[in-house]
Amino acid sequence: MKNKKTTDNETVVLGTIAEFAIEEYRFMRTYNSAIAKLFLEEKKRYVSSLNYHEEKVCDLLCKFGLRFVFFDGQDYDEGMPVTPLNADEFDGGDLIVEQTIEPAVITSEGNTIKQGTVILGRKETREENNTTEDKK
C-alpha cells in the first residue's frame, strides 16, 4: 500500500512540475516575441539570456525524467498526446501538425504527463505549397 501512495504522490509531483514547465514555456514564447521588437544591439543580450534560461528549464525537466515534445511537421494521428485546437475544421483526410502551440510533457518511459496543444493543417495543402515555392 505504501508504494501506491508513493506512486500517486509522484504522479501529482510530476504533474505539477509539468504544469510549471508549460507556464515557463509560455513565458519564454512571450519573452521571445518582446525580444523580436528590440534593436539588434539589445536583442543579442536578451536572446542569450533566453537561450540560457530555456536550456536550464530543459535540464531541470530531465532531472525529473521529463522532456518537452514538439510535433511541428509530423503527420497527425489521433493517438498523439495532443489536443488540436482546430480539429473541427477537418472531416478526415491526411492531416499534419502545422504548429505546436504548447509542447507535450513526456516521461523518459514515454508516459504522457501533460498533453500538448497543436494547430492542424491538410497534408496535401502543405505539400502543394512547398511544390509551388520550389518552382519560383
Image (cartoon, rainbow, N blue to C red):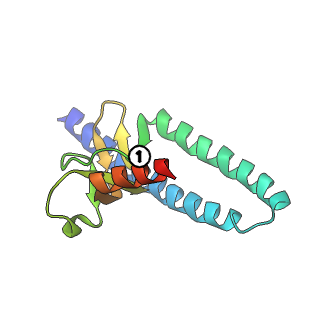
> Where does the image place residue 55, in percent across and percent down from the top left?
60, 41
In terms of depth relative to the viewer, which is nearer, 106 or 127? 127
Total numbered badges shown on the rendered structure:
1
Instruction: Give the residue at x 41% y 34%.
Output: 65
In terms of depth relative to the viewer, which is nearer, 4 or 19? 19
Instruction: Give the residue at x 48% y 35%.
Output: 62
Quickly name the residue at label 1: 70
Whether residue 115 is visible, yes or no, is no
Instruction: Give the residue at x 31% y 46%.
Output: 113
Instruction: Give the residue at x 35% y 41%.
Output: 106
Q: Is residue 22 left or right of residue 10?
A: right
Q: Is residue 58 left or right of residue 92?
A: right
> Where does the image place residue 80, in percent across and percent down from the top left?
24, 46
Q: Quadrant of residue 33?
A: bottom right
Q: Quadrant of the N terminus?
A: top left
> Where does the image place residue 85, in percent across and percent down from the top left?
30, 66
> Looking at the picture, does residue 89 appear above or below residue 100?
below
Q: Quadrant of residue 99?
A: bottom left
Crowding at dot 1, Cα within 10 Å, few <14 / some 14-19 / many 20+, comes out as some
